[in-house]
């Protein structure tokens, strides 16, 4: 008789535990019903990236001392540095610098370990092309700064679109009786 009673008790405990889990998930689902949708109409609206976002690499040719630290710290030896040693001044002179963004993993070691800070990460992430060879950027392409999202008047950021939606809702709710 006792095994049957303990079986009913364990069945009851399992039923209560399952009901509690279902109730918790239902409460979690209901907590999401009052939230606003987070839909981004991508080409016209862009989200603001975090502070340490790792996007396209920016290169300043004048600051580079051709030390090749970026090549040594890159896990895939990606930056291609062409240089020549000037015997009369006993210094390396940079001839060409290029990065293939089709292979780059955007780890950021090259930026972090550069002694002259000639490399930096930008907020640019739109690097899609139809031809893979267009992703090979030389020092001229790397030195161009991308247009910032905040400075581009054709793109509406999420913060601005959210504020405009709230303002529209406030103005639509503030109608008087004569408007009806």
Image: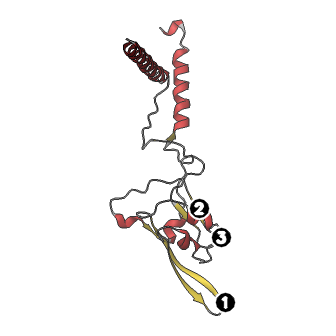
Residue name at image x 54 percent, y 53 percent: 123
CA gap, disc 3 and disc 1: 21 Å
Up/down of 94 relative to 45, above or below: below
* Tag 2 secondary structure: strand
Name the disc covering residue 120, or none: 2
**Up/down of 87 relative to 173, above or below:** below
Q: Dot 3: what SS?
A: loop
Q: Which dot, 3 or 1, sits closer to the camera?
A: 3
Q: Nearer the N terminus, badge 1 or badge 2? A: 1
Give the farthest residue toward the top: 177
| Few, some or many residues within 10 Å of mark 2 (<14, 14–19, 20+) | some
Residue 115 is tagged as 3
Name the N-terminal-most of marks 3 and 1.
Answer: 1
Q: Is residue 41 left or right of residue 160?
A: left
The crowd level at tag 3 (other Cα within 10 Å; few <14, some 14-19, many 20+) is: some
- At a point 52% along the width and 57% down the height, the residue shown is 146
Lower position in the chain sequence, tag 2 or tag 3: 3
Q: Which mark is residue 89?
A: 1
SS state under label 1: loop
């Amino acid at each position: 008789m006792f095994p049957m009673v303990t079986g009913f008790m364990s069945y009851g405990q399992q039923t209560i535990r399952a009901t509690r889990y279902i109730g918790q998930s239902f409460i979690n689902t209901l907590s999401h019903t009052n939230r606003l949708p987070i839909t981004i109409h991508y080409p016209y609206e862009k989200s603001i990236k975090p502070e340490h976002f790792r996007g396209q690499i920016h290169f300043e040719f004048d600051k580079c001392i051709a030390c090749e630290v970026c090549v040594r710290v890159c896990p895939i030896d990606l930056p291609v540095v062409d240089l020549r040693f000037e015997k009369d001044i006993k210094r390396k002179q940079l001839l060409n610098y290029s990065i293939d963004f089709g292979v780059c993993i955007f780890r950021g070691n090259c930026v972090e370990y550069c002694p002259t800070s000639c490399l930096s990460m930008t907020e640019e992430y739109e690097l899609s092309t139809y031809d893979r060879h267009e992703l090979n950027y030389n020092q001229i392409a790397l030195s161009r700064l991308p247009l910032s999202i905040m400075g581009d008047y054709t793109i509406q950021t999420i913060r601005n679109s959210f504020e405009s939606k709230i303002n529209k809702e406030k103005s639509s709710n503030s109608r008087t009786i004569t408007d009806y």
